[in-house]
Each structure stands twice: as C-alpha cells, then as structure tokens.
Image: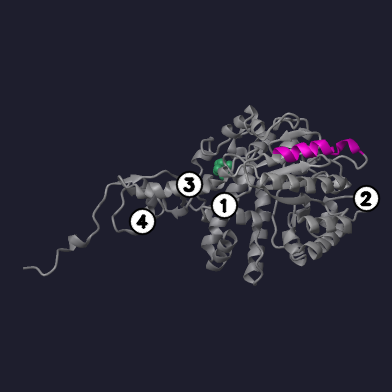
Amino acid sequence: MARFQPVSSFQPVAEELVLLPLRFERTKDARFIVSNLVGDLITLSEQQLREVVSLNLDPGSDLYALASEKFLVMKKGSRASLQLLAMRLRSRMAFLQHPTQLHILVVTLRCEHSCPYCQVSRQSTDRGRYDMPWETAVRAVEVALSTPSKYIKLEFQGGEPLLNFELIERIVPHAKKRAKTLDKELQFVITTNLALLDEHVLAFCLTEDIQISTSLDGPADLHNRNRPRPGGNSHQLAIAGIRRAQAVLGKHRVGALMTTTEQSLGRVEEIVDEYIRLEMDGIFLRPLSPYGFAVKTKQFFRYDAGEWLRFYEQGLRYILKINRDGRYFPEFYAALILRRMLTDRRIGYVDLRSPAGIGLGALVYNYDGKVFASDEGRMLAEMGDRSFELGALEGATYVSLILSDKLVDMVSASLTQCAPQCSTCVFEPHCGADPVYHHATQGDPVGIKPLSEFCARQKGIMTLLMRLLEESPEDAAILRRWAA
Ligand code: SF4
C-alpha cells in the first residue's frame, strides 16, 4: 500500500475564474500597465496580459497569484472579492459625503501687482467698485455655513485681499459667531502676495488663527520678472513677509505656491532651493492655467505639456535627492497623486475628483455677489465667459446653487468614469474630471483627451511616478512616505 498520496493530490485544483473590470495601456517599452477597478497598478508583458484576459492561468503559478491578489480575476461565485472591491471603492469616493468644504470669498479684484500671467484679471488699486460690500460678504457666509458639512474652510482671495482687509476684519468674527450657533468648525486662509503685510494684519491672523497662503516663483530675478509691481520689489516683500509670518504664526501656518512660466523652465533646482532656504515644508510645482491675463498675454502658450513634464521630472528627481540626503520635503502634487495610487483614502483636492469638484468641492463668492462653481470659473467670467456662474447670492441657497441645472449638467457630462478615452484609461481611478479646463481650452467640458494638455500631464506624471516606484527602493520608500 502506498504511504503517500499521488503528486496530483498536492497540486492546486483548477477553479473556474471570472475576469474583473480592468484597464490597460501599452508603455513605450512594449509592456502594459494594468489597473483594476480601484486603480491598483501593475506592469505585465503582453503574454502575461493575454493569459490573464483569456483566463488561461495555471493554478499555483505566480501570475495566477498576482492576478487574484490585484483583483483582476476571481473565483466564480466568490462574494468576498466583490465585497472588498466595493468597500474600497466606497472609501475612495467618500469625498462625496463631505459636500463643499471650501468657500472662497473674492473680497476685492484690486491688486497692486501687474503679473502678466494673472489668472483673475486683476484691477488697479484705485477701483473701489471692485471691492466686496459688507452685505454681500454676510450673505456669502450664510450660504457657506448652510452647507451640510461640519468643517468649513473660508478662503479670502483677490486680487490682493489685503487691499480690503477691513472687510476681512469684520467678516471673521461674524462668521465665527454664526458658526458657533450652527455648530460648525471654521478654518480661515488669506491668499496674499504679502506686499501689504504689516504688524496689524499679523496680529489679527494670530488672534483669529488664520493661515497664510502666498506666491513664490523662485529666486529674486525670476520672481520679480513673473510678478512685477511698482518698485520691482515683489520678491523682497514676499521673502520678508514669509519670514515675519513664520515667526509670528508658526512655519506650518504659512504656505506658498509657485507658477511655472517659460522663464522657469531650466531653473527648477534654483526654485526648489529657494523654498528650502525659506524652510517651507514642501513645494507644489504648478503649470500655468489657461485663464485671465495668462491667455491674453499669451504666457499660457509659451510651453507645452512635454516641456513642462521635463521640468517636472527634473524637479522631482532633485527633490528626491534632497529627501535622500535626510530632509523631508515633498512635492505636493506628486504626494496627492501617490495618495490616490497607493491608498484608498479620500483626498480633498478638487481637481483630482470625478464627479468633478466644481460646486461639490468648492464654491466661489465673487466681489459682485455672483456665485461660481470654481475659482477658475470666476476667472473665465472676467474674460466674458459666464458658463460656470451658478447665480447671484441674493435669493440663493446652498441647495439651489448645488442643484442648479448648469452645475448638474456640467458634473454629469464630465464624469471620467464614462467619458470617452477616460473610461478606458488605466489612470482613470487616480485622475480627475476638469470640466473648466476643458471648457476653457476646447469649448467643451469633456474635451478630446488626446488633444488635452491636462491629460498629457496627468499621464506623464503618473507614468513617471510608477517608474520611480520601481526604479529604486530608497526613492519608493520616500514616495510612499509622502502618500501616508
Ligand atoms: S484625463 Fe487623460 S489621464 Fe485622466 S483619466 Fe482621462 S484619459 Fe486618463
């Protein structure tokens, strides 16, 4: 009598498999990036992909294990895989349970800078009719606080909001009082170029717990060229303002954004060094947007997605080196995308969402009482295109704005989950519908994605991040830490 069972008894039993939803895209080196329903990304050879989609998988093989683990296939009739996928999808879409947390008040359109890439079409300082009146601000706060979310961020923008600082001084205590009665928690941000920052403004920000967000484009010559003002001292004032604000409010209460112009290309390391020198906690490498003076002065057309991606990669590699040398310093856009790619956590960033973040993620109350679905929407309005204007504050409620036909149409038309190109794109779970960008550049909220610079940049960045995650374990560990 045999003491052992035959070998065949120890081999895995072939199971009937079914294919789960997946997307794939050929890479330049003739391999395939493959993603499942929730965007877990792997790279396969053509042969491996063929075996997966034809369900020609040997039980017990590495490919069988990988395809099961990555939810590309499952056992027929298995509910566990579907339940897990559904749970992860729900978690990724949880941003829909937190409606409109960001409310932007454009307290003035006046500004003392005259940046040729200005996206808001600022007005000169003497034009008081571009200031938001008190009654409009009060109404904006009422609508913002009627949002179902408990946590509301009120951001003061311009123009240069410090040119109408009296309004901010009145509106902050008023909003806090109203929030207390309604059991809401408020956060405040002033987006300012800091040129008008003084002790009085700083003391107010400290007392009222207000964060500062500013613009810093790099070293002095580059910044001053991008951001002209009388006296040519924008950089000097910004640096002095950042240092004073850091000292009074704390480093974590002061953030800065840079904008990439044609002059920035080739200087990314100097730009990053400037942020390091100022002890900022990271950098957001941002391309120009197609709005306002950036279009009128043709700044927007001076470089394309390919040139920008080269700039971005050089910057990201340099930033990784800084991290390898021991300084934690994330590139914020990469961190946002990595969070999408490597975790199922919801993210607050409105441009990386589908359904789009217009209205649902942010509302903008303009100085003249008009309400817009996004900051870029009000920028378009200053150019004469009112497509993203949802109505007037007078008589509006949060519900009437959010359920307006215009917004519902734009959001439903632009869903990446069913838009041409996006619905089959391997990066769709990590991308976003950006109807304002595509409306501005192609006259259509969906857009033709192969012609879209937004799409080219998104694909370029995500492919680069995948490559970096695979290239070196040390860089992968850094990138994973950014996503945490
Ligand atoms: S915009 Fe481009 S990268 Fe983003 S999901 Fe659509 S096709 Fe993919």
Mark 4 highlights which residue? 63
Give the mark, 2 or 1, whose residue is nearer the N terminus: 2
Mark 1 highlights which residue? 462
- Say which amino acid is labelled 4: Leu
The disc label shown at residue 337, or none: none
Mark 3 highlights which residue? 89
Image coordinates for residue 254, horizontal then vertical, percent:
76, 59
Dot 4 falls on a residue whose secondary structure is helix
In the rendered image, the residue lying farthest to the left is 1
Residue 220 counted in the magenta span? no
- Say which amino acid is labelled 2: Pro
Closer to viewer: mark 4 or mark 2 = 2
In the rendered image, the residue lying farthest to the front is 181
Image coordinates for residue 119, horizontal then vertical, percent:
77, 42
Mark 2 highlights which residue? 230
Give the mark, 1 or 4, whose residue is nearer the N terminus: 4
* Residue located 75% across and 60% down the image: 271
* Segment colored magenta: 127-143
- Say which amino acid is labelled 1: Met
Quadrant, the C terminus = bottom right
Image coordinates for residue 113, horizontal then vertical, percent:
87, 47
Q: Nearer the viewer, residue 256 or 146?
A: 146
Dot 3 falls on a residue whose secondary structure is helix
The image quadrant of residue 437 is top right
Residue at disc 1, CB closer than 8 Å to ligand 1: yes
Closer to viewer: mark 2 or mark 1 = 2
Q: Nearer the viewer, residue 111 or 269?
A: 111
- Say which amino acid is labelled 3: Leu
Q: Main secondary structure of the magenta part?
A: helix
